[in-house]
């Protein structure tokens, strides 16, 4: 291996370890790149490292930062350019939901990726619990840079209307809820790599859906009750409670999580029972 390649590889490791960010070049990742053939030109992580040319990295680069979220299985990737633009988000809870986005489809090809979420200027990747970020991150970096270099649209279809858009049939309470979600609650949730969607209001109960890193975050219930519910009740006395809404994918994930939690408790109890000394009753004469 030449000295140039060794230097590039060591700098790559240093960036990931110390500052949790990376600067790489599209031109250095392949010998020839055709924008119309970007799918077939994606390199594996091994090819990426082997073909890295350090001088070219500095001449043509894309700066991607990563940011931790409250969910240890979700990571926020910030490419330094707009993804969907201000105020727009799109959630891909599974690969079947990625039909309208070529970028989301590519990200789902990475082994261990569970869900993808697009924000205004960031992309949140959620992984399976047993997957390693060290492997996934390098592939996410490469795919994001390849895709933005191709010039293709992130979405093939227009993003859906905002859930907080004021409609003619909205009453005063619903309009106030939507305004609070947009102005005070949603910006905070999006900083953590997620989003919160208004699903409805009925008999004092506000129904919300968590997306992105927040959808499977262990503290999502705490966020809803201690954060969102308290704020809504402070400004809108008519709000009695906040309820989290789950779709079919969320229900499956929640069910599997509950099963895992029960199995862990059973194993823990079995270990305690095995370690406990036998109960010997003394016979009285």
Image (cartoon, grey):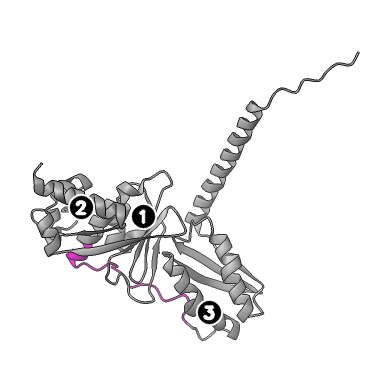
Q: Residue at x 60, y 71 (%)?
A: 229
For the question of whether residue 178 can be seen, the reply is yes
Q: CA distance from mark 1 to mark 2?
A: 34 Å
Q: Residue at x 31, y 50 (%)?
A: 136
Span highlighted in magenta in the image: 147-165
From the image, tell me which residue sits under label 2. Answer: 11
From the image, tell me which residue sits under label 3. Answer: 180
Question: Regarding mark 2 in the picture, which secondary structure is present there?
Answer: helix
Q: Look at the image and say whether residue 141 sits in the magenta stretch.
A: no
Q: Are marks 3 and 2 in contact (CB under 8 Å)?
A: no
- Quadrant housing residue 54: bottom left
Horizontal and vertical percent for residue 17? 30, 52
Q: Are marks 1 and 3 in contact (CB under 8 Å)?
A: no
Give the quadrant of the N terminus: top left
Question: Regarding mark 1 in the picture, which secondary structure is present there?
Answer: helix
- Quadrant housing residue 97: bottom left
Camera-near label (3 vs 2) is 2
Q: Residue at x 54, y 68 (%)?
A: 208
Crowding at label 2, few (<14), some or many (≥20) Cα neighbours within 10 Å? some
Crowding at label 3, few (<14), some or many (≥20) Cα neighbours within 10 Å? some
């Amino acid at each position: 291996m030449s000295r140039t390649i060794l230097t590039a590889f060591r700098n790559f490791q240093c960036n990931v370890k110390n500052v949790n960010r990376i600067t790489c070049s599209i031109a250095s990742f392949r010998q020839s790149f055709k924008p119309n053939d970007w799918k077939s030109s994606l390199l594996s992580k091994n090819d990426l490292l082997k073909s890295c040319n350090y001088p070219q990295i500095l001449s043509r680069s894309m700066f991607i930062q990563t940011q931790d979220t409250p969910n240890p299985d979700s990571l926020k990737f910030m490419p330094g350019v707009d993804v969907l633009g201000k105020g727009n988000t799109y959630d891909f809870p599974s690969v079947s939901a990625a039909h309208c986005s070529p970028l989301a489809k590519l990200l789902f090809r990475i082994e261990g990726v569970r869900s993808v979420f697009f924000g205004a200027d960031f992309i949140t990747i959620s992984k399976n619990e047993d997957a390693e970020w060290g492997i996934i991150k390098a592939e996410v970096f490469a795919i994001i840079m390849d895709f933005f270099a191709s010039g293709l649209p992130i979405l093939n279809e227009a993003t859906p209307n905002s859930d907080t858009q004021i409609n003619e049939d909205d009453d005063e309470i619903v309009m106030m809820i939507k305004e609070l979600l947009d102005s005070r609650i949603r910006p905070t949730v999006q900083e953590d790599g997620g989003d919160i969607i208004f699903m409805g209001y009925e008999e004092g109960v506000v129904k919300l859906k968590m997306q992105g890193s927040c959808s499977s975050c262990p503290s999502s219930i705490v966020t809803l009750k201690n954060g969102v519910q308290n704020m809504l009740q402070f400004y809108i006395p008519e709000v009695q409670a906040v309820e989290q809404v789950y779709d079919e994918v969320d229900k499956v994930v929640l069910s599997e999580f509950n099963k895992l939690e029960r199995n862990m408790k059973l194993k823990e109890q079995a270990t305690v029972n095995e370690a406990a000394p036998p109960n010997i009753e003394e016979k009285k004469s």
